[in-house]
Image (cartoon, rainbow, N blue to C red):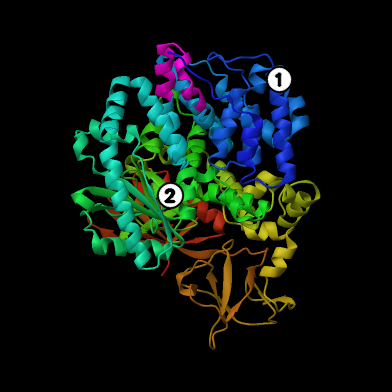
């Protein structure tokens, strides 16, 4: 069979790039990358016969269709240079810079693997390709385009290799393209894979589509005219397109038992309008004339997919009684639906390049839960086989999408629990979770979440995980984090928690870690906090002795000044208390009995009427809606008192362990004031009143109690 080559040139590629990249410096950088690629690939040819440079040019051309940025285009042009040519990393760094070189290295790391159909090698390949791509999302975007062009010329390879490469593309790369929202590349990869894996089925579907093509095109054309007239009557400016169904998507439906004649969305339209409001107006107008098919309406505008896809989907009984699937979306939604996060569509609106890149980075951080899942898994030290099974079962398949109260999307395995949700937000949220509210209803922590649930996690800083959670969580990553908590020493847990808190606060303030915790800055922090090294600092933050805010404020003074109360006054201490009050010479101070603050807690003062200042923990529910009559307070560093604390100890046993609990508390050098059972049906819950020196001692007590097999949770009681 003869094959012709589409020998595109660099000028062809640049013509496409200049449509959306206008910056001269970026265009010059692309030219430099091409010159290096052309020089290094000189004299090389592909197995299909064309000069090798045609391949990187085609990869770059594919990426122009999704508006990839200049660094991604440069990496595409150079993606085989380190692997196949006489070029050092230093030489490439000098010519195109560190970022592009790192992207090329990422693609090279994947490409250097020698694949085998043997199970262990195949599994290792899956593991390394997925972990490797996670370092920078653009690495996998280049790899997807690279594989797509290779699939287009797959005829040049023996049949065994064709099937192996097609299988990898279909099982791993196409689903990743779907997660990234890159529909163009994903859809073509699927069709080409089917062509080589099941050629009989592929060509049979293609032939059937061909036979019905004229009839379908005539019907679609009539329907397009009718819908256009309808929308024009209502002054809705729009663009209407016929939409081809991919061969692979038809195969999937046939494979599920449908007949070719029953695949009603072979006739499909896409309507593009200017605004979100017009999407809904157009939908209503179309439904007023054409009866919608029940249960076939999907609103992905109000509830977008995690790959940022937004559109309205409806199926209507159209002209001649034919069923039409109609998608309605804005032009901007269409760009993202077709091109995914790789699309720099903002270039087309002449937005500032730096703003565009910042916006893209934010979108990536918020939406690509998929990649965060992979990175988390790669750190869990799973065996190769477990890793791939988890990726397939929990990451690539059967996911549900839940929301935080703020509307952020969290991707989870099907039937995941609120504990899985909490750990996905942050390890500390998971470790301190005490309850969950789903769709405004209180649910147990082992509740199975559903697609679209809105989940709020209640936390308590002094709470720790329960071993019982391991039995019902669905995510392997969550299970491993809970197990890890119980295998580490108490000190290690608090050090890790402290470091996480500091890093999170720095990210919130957009300050690099090294800017605060190096050199003189670190020396100053250690001196003020009165600790010997950074590990001890982490420990203090992790166990609650110092807050992350107060530590960072030592250096980040502009932030401190911005956040501090406007009235700056002298600080004097009331001689009878352990509390220092800002701006008041002498006043009666009492610890609130609703939340029982203890030394080390973050606290605030509330000016009462006639009873001085009442001291509360910052998370006290009685202080939630109070903005006035508050005063800044802090603990005196030289406190030597004991403080009242009330705990709820949750048991998993139907036996009374009161005596054992008292013994355990006493061993921690804590005075027990009283203990009683407050709930006893199938299991016991105990209310413990005790006196502790500080938050560190209380955390130590809670940690030791939760080590007992019959104790599921210990939490501070708040009235």
Q: Is residue 90 left or right of residue 670?
A: right
What is the secondary structure assignment of the residue under circle 1? helix
The residue lying furthest to the bottom in this view is 610
Q: Is residue 688 left or right of residue 508?
A: left
Check disc 1: other Cα within 10 Å, few if <14, some if 14-19, many if 20+.
some
Check disc 2: other Cα within 10 Å, few if <14, some if 14-19, many if 20+.
many
Residue 154 part of the magenta segment: yes
Residue placed under numbered mark 1 in the picture: 40
Eyeballing the image, is 74 above or below 198? Answer: below
What range of the chain is rendered magenta? Answer: 149-168
Q: Is residue 669 visible?
A: no
Q: CA distance from mark 1 to mark 2?
A: 40 Å
Whole-percent x, y for residue 38 in the image: 69, 23
Q: Is residue 255 visible?
A: yes
Which badge, 1 or 2, is on the more N-terminal residue?
Answer: 1
Whole-percent x, y for residue 507 in the image: 62, 52
Q: Residue at x 69, y 53 (%)?
A: 511
Circle on res. 309:
2
The residue lying furthest to the right in this view is 520
Circle on res. 155:
none
In front of the other: 31 or 233? 233
Q: Residue at x 45, y 70 (%)?
A: 621
| Quarter that holds the C terminus | bottom left
Q: How many marks?
A: 2
Q: Main secondary structure of the magenta part?
A: helix
Q: Is residue 524 left or right of residue 216?
A: right
Rendered image quadrant of residue 636: bottom right
What is the secondary structure assignment of the residue under circle 2? loop
Foreground mark, 1 or 2? Answer: 1
Residue 221 part of the magenta segment: no
Eyeballing the image, is 404 above or below 179? Answer: below
Q: Residue at x 81, y 50 (%)?
A: 520
């Amino acid at each position: 069979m003869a094959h012709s080559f589409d020998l595109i040139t660099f000028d062809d590629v640049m013509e496409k790039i200049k449509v959306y990249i206008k910056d001269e410096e970026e265009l010059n950088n692309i030219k430099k990358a091409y010159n290096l690629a052309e020089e290094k690939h000189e004299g090389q040819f592909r197995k299909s016969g064309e000069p090798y440079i045609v391949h990187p040019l085609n990869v770059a051309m594919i990426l122009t269709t999704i508006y990839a940025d200049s660094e991604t285009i440069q990496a595409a042009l150079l993606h085989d240079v380190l692997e196949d040519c006489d070029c050092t990393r230093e030489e490439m760094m000098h010519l195109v810079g560190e970022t592009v070189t790192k992207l090329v290295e990422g693609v090279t790391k994947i490409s250097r693997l020698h694949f085998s159909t043997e199970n262990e090698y195949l599994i290792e390949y899956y593991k390394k390709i997925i972990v490797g791509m996670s370092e920078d999302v653009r690495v996998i975007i280049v790899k997807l385009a690279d594989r797509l062009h290779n699939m287009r010329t797959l005829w040049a390879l023996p049949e065994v290799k064709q099937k192996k490469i097609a299988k990898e593309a279909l099982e791993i790369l196409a689903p990743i393209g779907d997660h990234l929202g890159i529909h163009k590349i994903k859809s073509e990869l699927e069709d080409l894979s089917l062509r080589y894996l099941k050629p009989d089925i592929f060509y049979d579907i293609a032939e059937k589509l061909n036979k019905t093509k004229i009839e379908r095109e005539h019907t679609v054309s009539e329907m397009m005219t009718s819908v256009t007239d309808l929308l024009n009557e209502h002054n809705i400016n729009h663009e209407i397109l016929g939409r081809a169904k991919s061969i692979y998507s038809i195969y999937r439906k046939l494979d599920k038992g449908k007949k070719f004649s029953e695949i009603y969305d072979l006739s499909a339209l896409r309507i593009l309008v200017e605004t979100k409001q017009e999407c809904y107006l157009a939908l209503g107008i179309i439904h007023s004339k054409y009866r919608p098919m029940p249960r076939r309406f999907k609103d992905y505008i109000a509830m977008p997919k995690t790959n940022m896809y937004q559109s309205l989907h409806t199926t209507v009984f159209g002209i001649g009684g034919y069923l039409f699937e109609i998608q309605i979306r804005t032009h901007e939604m269409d760009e993202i639906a077709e091109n995914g996060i790789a699309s720099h569509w903002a270039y087309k609106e002449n937005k500032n390049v730096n703003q565009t890149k910042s916006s893209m980075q934010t979108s990536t951080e918020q939406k690509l839960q998929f990649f965060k899942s992979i990175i988390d898994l790669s750190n869990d030290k799973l065996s190769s086989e477990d890793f791939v099974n988890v990726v397939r079962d929990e990451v690539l398949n059967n996911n549900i999408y839940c929301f935080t109260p703020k509307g952020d999307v969290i991707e989870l395995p099907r039937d995941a629990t609120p504990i899985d949700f909490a750990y996905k937000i942050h390890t500390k949220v998971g470790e301190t979770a005490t309850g969950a509210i789903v769709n405004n209803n209180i649910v147990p922590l082992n509740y199975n979440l559903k697609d679209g649930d809105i989940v709020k996690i209640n936390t308590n800083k002094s709470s720790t995980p329960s071993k019982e959670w391991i039995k019902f969580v669905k995510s392997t990553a969550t299970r491993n984090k809970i197990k890890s908590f119980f295998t580490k020493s108490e000190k290690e847990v608090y050090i890790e928690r402290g470091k996480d808190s500091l890093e999170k606060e720095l990210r919130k303030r957009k300050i690099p870690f090294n800017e605060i915790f190096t050199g003189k800055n670190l020396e100053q922090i250690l001196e003020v906090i009165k600790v010997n090294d950074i590990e001890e600092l982490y420990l203090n933050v992790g166990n609650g002795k110092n807050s992350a805010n107060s530590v960072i404020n030592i250096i980040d003074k502009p932030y401190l000044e911005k956040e501090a109360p406007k009235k700056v006054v002298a600080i004097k201490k009331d001689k009878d208390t352990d509390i220092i009050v800002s701006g008041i010479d002498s006043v009666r101070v009492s610890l609130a009995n609703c939340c029982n603050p203890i030394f080390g807690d973050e606290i605030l003062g509330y000016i009462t009427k006639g009873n001085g200042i009442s001291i509360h923990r910052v998370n006290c529910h009685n202080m939630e809606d109070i903005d006035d009559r508050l005063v800044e307070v802090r603990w005196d560093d030289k406190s030597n008192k004991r403080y009242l604390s009330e705990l709820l100890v949750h048991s998993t046993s139907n036996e009374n362990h009161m005596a054992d609990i008292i013994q355990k508390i006493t061993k921690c050098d804590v005075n027990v004031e009283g203990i009683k059972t407050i709930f006893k049906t199938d299991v016991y819950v105990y209310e413990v009143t005790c006196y502790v020196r500080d938050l560190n001692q209380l955390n130590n007590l809670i940690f030791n109690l939760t080590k007992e097999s019959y104790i599921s949770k210990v939490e501070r009681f708040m009235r």
